[in-house]
């Protein structure tokens, strides 16, 4: 990677070679690399360069090459400075792309480098700073912003000046700009303004005048275009399909088409034609404003946002539901988009046999419904498959799927918990049935004329029984046994119909740990059937909450829970993590039922681990290390006992797209860690995998290690915590390490830090007692 830094009094710019940052989406990533899993189908704007077209989505960009028809993603993972794109624009004169973000950050891509201009983002401005559109005039880019107009010098990569054009110099949201060679026109939230473009005092609000003769002079105008001596503006309607287009030909204002009121998304001039994009089609008009063509019908759920013609008979269309559309006619069109989930919403994840499943529902802070219907997503063989009401029968009522789990003996057998519809069962991507109060032990809430069954947690025990939490009912803990029979349990007196129940953890010792996030009392209820599900007389239960002798939780707001490889229960609360070191004894009450907090050294002082930090997710990797997701501080990777911070990922120091983490799931086979954030899903290839009891298919990668490779060399498929020695062919030991779970890492150097020379190296692996051994080889190739 090359980094070019130029400091001026305006900004700090950094150029990053894009070609070194891309990886192929269909390939498994290397250790230490990131990749995003975002919905690139929602294209809202496009920008055409000579040999490619850029497509902006809410989450990032992708580019489509005309040369080889390849697709490349552009996001924070591979060099972009931010997340959440607001608009893009290409300059033909200067061969560069401007990317504006929702937070007013700006990137410029020029000659395969990215230059960041963060002046507006860093500037303390009250109100809306967002950049809504970009207009190029010579070497300047005019940015329509929520407070006015910012002019960028695109050759110097710096801010030139700012125009605040509202009455008395007040802030005024500018939605779009156009230029007719003499006048600069602004469509704003309170009317249409103009000023002479060559006026040396454009910073003075007084040189800007508003059209007072237009219908509703102070209305919100969100699009504007100069076309053949005419000024055309779009008045944004308050409701759907109530926009109004108006035309000024120098003699006054008239309606563009008085009979039509649509929701319009795009208004631009290309190749002597005016292109209007509305909610269902793209239309082109000649200089007399006579419609020449109407383009529609490429998809049953088409949602055009923007259009650029390529040549007669070929138009590129940004579609917010489908991606990039290459359109010739209603019978000849192509949809282009990177593979990915259809939504950035992730409520829960589960992975087994290299297949990741995602539930896309959600609940509000008060545990009300969000009524999401995007369904569930599957990531298998490096490709995403979306399963929802659009392609699978019976899913039109699968509202808010918030939990998902894979049958431990059948990776194609999936259960989905809905915060409305009960429990959905799938086989091989098809719906088998809904389990409700009609055919299972689940119960509906006791409200007349309202059919609602809330499932908040799912977990399999070691016998293959599925444990389920059923919120706001008399018997909120339910089990679907491995023989298909059902039973429900009361958690009274701790849980009533006034309580919500969420996660359930089925522990190695046979207990069920149930999180109570809302109600008259909050905390954790631990249930033990004593190994006799049918005999309720020997059942035990206890509630863990704040207070010594009562559970010793630092807060009764429990957000997450996980069991580590030693059987210890880690609990994430609103104010930090705690551990139950001997969970099998919590039923005894008193000190045995109390959690402990981890003490750590920081800056010479002893304090509680992540004290005051809301822990929203906990995941355990193959080396028994702890991955803790937080509400505001990103992700922490901790040592096995939590006393050492091994890594801390945030949106500032890594490609993590948000510091608000909803869920973490780890692929035990290859160590890839999936982070579900409030902005979407992203993953990181970590160094630990799950070890086996015997050496099976041991894999070294890369192998051979070529001369230009500088990354880690992984030895995967080992027994847990194996001892690994790497020697020359003559037997000299050059490196020794202990596997992280089932994977050992070699940096390609000897004990002195010197790169290993060209040759064949032997890898000797043994388990702890020496009863299991394995030898493999690594070929290292160095340059002369």
Image (cartoon, rainbow, N blue to C red):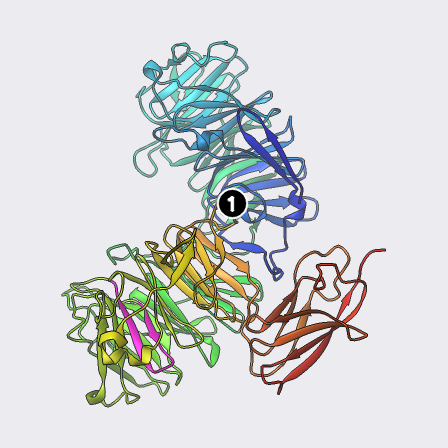
Left or right: where does residue 67 sit relative to residue 723? right
Q: Which residue lies most toward the front here?
A: 604
Could you tell me what secondary structure mostly forms the magenta stretch?
Answer: strand
Find out whether residue 150 is within the magenta segment. no
- Image quadrant assignment for residue 189: top left
Q: Position of residue 619 (x, y in %)?
A: 43, 66
Residue 450 locus on image (x, y percent): 19, 64
Mark 1 crowd level (few <14, some 14–19, many ≥20, 10 Å Cα): many
Q: Residue visible at 60% across and 60% down?
A: 31
Q: Nearer the viewer, residue 245 or 693?
A: 693
Query: In the displayed structure, would residue 14 be above or below residue 299?
Result: above
Tell me the residue that label 1 is attached to: 60
The question of residue 507 being in magenta is answered with yes
Question: Which residue is at a point 77% across and 68% down the rendered structure image?
Answer: 779
> In the image, which residues are magenta?
503-517
The image shows residue 774 at horizontal and vertical percentages of 68, 81
Q: Is residue 108 above or below residue 733?
A: above
239 or 594: which is nearer to us?
594
**Horizontal relation, residue 67 to residue 442: left or right:** right
Residue 208 appears in the picture as rendered:
yes
Q: Secondary structure at mark 1?
A: loop
Quadrant housing the N terminus = top right
């Amino acid at each position: 990677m090359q980094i070019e830094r130029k400091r001026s009094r305006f900004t700090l710019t950094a150029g990053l070679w894009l070609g070194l940052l891309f990886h192929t989406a269909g390939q498994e990533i290397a250790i230490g690399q990131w990749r995003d899993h975002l919905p690139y189908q929602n294209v809202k704007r496009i920008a055409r360069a000579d040999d490619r077209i850029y497509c902006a989505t809410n989450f990032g960009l992708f580019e489509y090459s005309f040369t080889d028809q390849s697709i490349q993603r552009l996001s924070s993972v591979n060099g972009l400075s931010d997340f959440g794109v607001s608009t893009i624009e290409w300059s033909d004169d200067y061969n560069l792309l401007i990317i504006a973000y929702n937070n007013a950050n700006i990137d410029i891509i020029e000659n395969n480098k990215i230059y960041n201009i963060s002046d507006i983002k860093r500037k303390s401005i009250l109100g809306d700073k967002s950049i809504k559109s970009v207009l190029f005039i010579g070497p300047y880019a005019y940015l329509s912003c929520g407070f006015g107009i910012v002019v960028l010098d695109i050759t110097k990569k710096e801010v030139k000046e700012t125009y605040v054009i509202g009455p008395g110099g007040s802030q005024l949201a500018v939605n779009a700009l156009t230029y007719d060679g003499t006048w600069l026109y602004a469509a704003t939230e309170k009317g249409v303004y103009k000023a002479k473009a060559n006026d040396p005092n454009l910073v003075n609000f007084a040189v800007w005048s508003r059209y007072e003769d237009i219908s509703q002079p102070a209305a919100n105008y969100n699009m504007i275009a100069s076309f053949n001596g005419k000024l055309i503006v779009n008045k944004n309607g308050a409701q759907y399909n109530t926009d109004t287009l108006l035309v000024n030909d120098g003699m006054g204002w008239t309606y563009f088409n008085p009979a039509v009121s649509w929701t319009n998304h795009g208004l631009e001039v290309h190749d002597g034609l005016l292109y209007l994009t509305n909610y269902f089609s793209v239309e082109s008009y000649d200089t007399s404003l006579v419609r020449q063509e109407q383009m529609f019908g490429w998809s049953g759920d088409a949602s055009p946002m923007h259009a650029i013609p390529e040549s007669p008979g070929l138009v590129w269309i940004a579609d917010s539901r489908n991606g990039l559309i290459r359109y010739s006619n209603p019978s000849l069109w192509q949809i282009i988009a990177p593979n990915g989930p259809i939504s950035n919403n992730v409520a829960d994840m589960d992975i087994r046999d290299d297949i990741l499943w995602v539930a896309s529902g959600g609940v509000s802070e008060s545990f009300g419904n969000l009524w999401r219907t995007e369904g569930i997503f599957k990531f298998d063989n490096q490709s995403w498959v979306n399963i929802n009401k659009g392609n699978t029968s019976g899913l039109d009522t699968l509202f808010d799927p918030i939990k998902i789990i894979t049958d431990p003996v059948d990776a194609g057998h999936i259960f989905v918990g809905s915060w409305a519809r009960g429990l959905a069962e799938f086989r091989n991507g098809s719906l088998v049935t809904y389990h409700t109060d009609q055919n299972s032990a689940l119960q509906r809430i006791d409200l007349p004329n309202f059919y609602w069954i809330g499932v908040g947690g799912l977990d399999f025990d070691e016998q293959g029984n599925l444990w389920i939490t059923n919120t706001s009912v008399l018997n909120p803990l339910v089990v679907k046994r491995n023989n298909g029979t059902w039973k429900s349990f009361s958690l009274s007196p701790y849980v009533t119909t006034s309580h919500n129940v969420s996660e359930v953890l089925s522990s190695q010792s046979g207990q069920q740990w149930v999180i109570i996030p809302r109600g008259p009392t909050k905390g954790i209820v631990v249930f033990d059937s004593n190994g006799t599900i049918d005999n309720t007389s020997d059942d035990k239960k206890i509630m863990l909450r704040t207070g010594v002798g009562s559970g010793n939780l630092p807060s009764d707001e429990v957000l997450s829970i996980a069991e580590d490889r030693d059987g210890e229960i880690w609990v994430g609360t609103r104010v930090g993590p705690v551990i139950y070191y001997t969970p099998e004894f919590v039923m005894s009450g008193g000190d045995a039922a109390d959690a402990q907090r981890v003490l750590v050294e920081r800056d010479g002082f002893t304090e509680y681990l992540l004290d005051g930090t809301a822990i929203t997710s906990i995941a355990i990797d193959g080396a028994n290390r702890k991955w803790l997701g937080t509400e505001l501080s990103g992700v922490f990777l901790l040592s096995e006992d939590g006393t050492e911070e091994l890594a801390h990922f945030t949106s500032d120091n890594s490609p993590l797209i948000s510091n608000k983490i909803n869920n973490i799931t780890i692929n035990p086979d290859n160590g890839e860690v999936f982070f579900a954030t409030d902005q979407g899903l992203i993953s990181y290839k970590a160094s630990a995998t799950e070890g086996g009891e015997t050496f099976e298919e041991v894999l070294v990668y890369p192998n051979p290690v070529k001369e230009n490779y500088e990354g880690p060399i992984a030895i995967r498929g080992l027994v847990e915590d194996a001892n690994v020695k790497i020697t020359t062919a003559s037997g000299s030991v050059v490196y020794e390490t202990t596997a992280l779970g089932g994977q050992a890492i070699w940096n390609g150097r000897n004990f002195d830090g010197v790169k290993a020379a060209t040759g064949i190296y032997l890898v000797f692996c043994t388990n702890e007692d020496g009863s299991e051994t394995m030898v493999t080889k690594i070929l290292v190739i160095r340059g002369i």
